Image: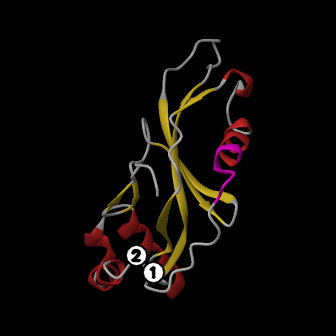
Amino acid sequence: MRAIATSIMSIALVMGYPALAGKKDKEIAAWKSTLPAADADYGAYPDNYEQLIKEYLARSLKDPDSVRYTDFTKPRKEHAIENAGLKQAIYGYSSCVLVNAKNSYGGYTGNHQYWFFIQNGKIVRSSDTTTGLKIIYLGRPINCEDGP
């Protein structure tokens, strides 16, 4: 039962309902302010990030052969929250790209900006920032600037 309550509070905080999160809110907010950790291990730089992104999208788009990619951003060090209640952060790299692909009717949808979080050579999170979430977690917006 306690695990369920902790999960609900964590979900409430991440989803932007701090009043539902109770006293954990201040504790988690204080923890978030310490991120990224000084000893964070981001893993190896993903030199093949363009290929990873293209393969990832090929599995989810209706017509992957029609995709037009533009403006890949160089990966930048990034962190996200895997489990706020247990205070677990994950580290890796993020990259963005503009994607234009055909829909079910055969017409191009127009450019959509996608954000990808790459950890240890795999994409573990993504978001269509044109129509979906524009945050990594509450208080941390997605940044699509080039990395170093």
Q: How far apart are marks 2 and 1 (CA)?
A: 8 Å
42 is higher (above) or lower (below) than 143: below
The image position of residue 41, as x and y in percent, is 57, 79
134 is higher (above) or lower (below) than 13: above
Q: How crowded is mark 1: few (under 14 residues within 10 Å), some or many (20 or more)?
A: many
55 is higher (above) or lower (below) than 102: below
Residue identifier under label 1:
85
The image position of residue 40, as x and y in percent, is 51, 81
Instruction: Pick whichever of labels 2 and 1 is earlier in the sequence.
Output: 2
Residue identifier under label 2:
9
The stretch drawn in magenta includes residue 47: yes
Q: What residue type is labelled 1?
A: Gly
Span shown in magenta = 46-51
Q: Is residue 51 left or right of residue 10?
A: right
- Per the image, label 1 sits on a secondary structure element best described as loop
- Per the image, label 2 sits on a secondary structure element best described as helix
